[in-house]
Image (tube, rainbow, N blue to C red):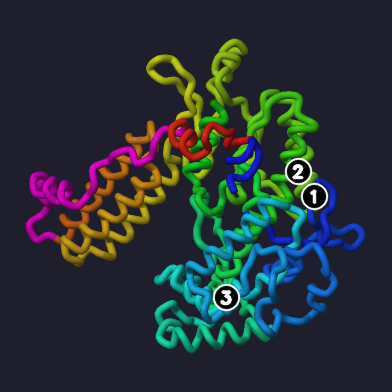
Amino acid sequence: MNDPGKSDKPVVAMRGPGPCGIPVNQPEAGNPPQPANFWDLWKQVKRRSLTKKNEEDDSEPEGQGPPQNGPAKQSDGTQSPVRPAQAGSEGLQSALERIRQAARRDRELKFTNLWHHVYGIEQLREAYLGLKRQAAPGVDGQTWQQYGKNLEENLRDLSERLIQGTYHARPVQRVYIPKADGRKRPIGMPVLEDKIVQRATVRVLNAVYEEDFLGFSYGFRPGRNCHQALDALAVGISPLLANIYLHYVFDLWAEQWRHRMARGDVIIVRYADDFVVGFQHKTDADEFLTQLRERFRQFGLELHAEKTRVIEFGRFAAERRKQRKQGKPATFNFLGFTHSCSKTRNGKFVVLRQTIAKRLRTKLEQIREKLRKRMHDGVEETGRWLRSVVQGYMQFHGIPRNLRAVSRFRHWVSLMWREMMSRRSQKGAVRWDLMAKLIHQWLPVPHICHPYPEERLAGTLRGKSPVR
């Protein structure tokens, strides 16, 4: 692994680095910089050259599409010429690994000649197969299955349009899904062909930019997930393109701030656009928050007013608050879990992570509603569905010291299942001895699915800090 504060192992290039290495698009006077869109970012990525020379000759004229004649040769040996129609999965993986190694050796290298790793038919096919089969369609109504009926013809046509520069992204359908607090979250649903191109592109971008990401960033990165972020948070306190954007706007700035401005220790854990920052001194926390608000304002962003707060938390929080005759330390929510100060039976401080109660109730209400719609389904069909629901819930929420919440979830699912079966029965309520057999047959027994944070991070980070 790398040194503390470094990435485990690949950035969309933007126009010229500004202060702290932050690339910015030059704004008009008085206006904050605006984030570049997906394709503007990609055009600039292609201008990073692996050869340090002839940069002017390698760059594309403004407004033109990808190169017409396929990949050019690389003079530094990091890439081999690859014919798009013949580049299989193994060839793509080896090519991406060479790109990753080149980025690791010299972070000043500028990459070009990467476009063929996107428009190759094998690459597009692999991206198509990696999409969710049952995902909702975009504005054109085309599903994964419909596109696959003429897959080879569709992929050849898509590849040709990418090569010629005539491919244009379609409008994104906007839908809203309800949140636990009653508000609605906007979700963008691109058409399936855009998903294919974006997925193929992100694979190449990951190879280049993963080297630049810092160690405390966990969201949407290869080999990292939200449970590692939760583990890093617990240990630290005892703390696709959007990820790249926040790397520049937040990560690099926060990294410099804690080394130059902080008077005490600072830990950071970020997963996508959710992050927790821990400070040894309250004065550091207040100053950081003030400057962070200004930093985000410069980029047209703002912190969530209800979720952003400074609280006293940690090993000595309870004792200090008791001396001041104050209540228990406040809790905070992160990635679906409520974090609170607690102790083991031996008196050792731990960060207790429990399923957010409101989300548990919301999930149970959703299951109750779906059970009503499934009232006349067969017992076996409903049992299989509930098994997948309970198993999936347990896979996420089954972390150490949270077994009670998982058991409570299974218990309430069992009650709702019996209630549904009793309503459709001609003989009244289903007897508990019969129901117990069904529960035992179909619903998994609650258990912990994840190791303790110290154990997981010790194995994946090899002793290096996950929060610095």
Residue drawn at the location 25% of the way across and 51% of the way down: 416
The residue to which callout 1 is attached is: 21
The residue to which callout 3 is attached is: 194
Residue drawn at the location 58% of the way across and 45% of the way down: 8
Query: For mark 3, does the 10 Å Cα neighbourhood hold few (<14), some (14 to 19), or many (20 or more) residues?
Result: some
The span shown in magenta is 425-453
Residue drawn at the location 59% of the way across and 16% of the way down: 321
Q: How many numbered marks have been drawn onto this rendered protein structure?
A: 3
Q: Which mark is residue 253?
A: 2
Answer with the quarter of the image where residue 164 lies.
Answer: bottom right
Tag 2 or tag 3, which sits nearer the N-term? 3
Whole-percent x, y for residue 195 in the image: 54, 72
Whole-percent x, y for residue 466 in the image: 57, 36
Tag 2 or tag 1, which sits nearer the N-term? 1
Indicate whether 244 appears above or below 79: above
- Identified by mark 1, the residue type is Gly
Whole-percent x, y for residue 45 in the image: 72, 66
Nearer to the camera, 83 or 283: 83
19 horizontally vs 46: left or right: right
Indicate whether 407 appears above or below 75: above
Q: Specify whether residue 128 is in view.
A: yes
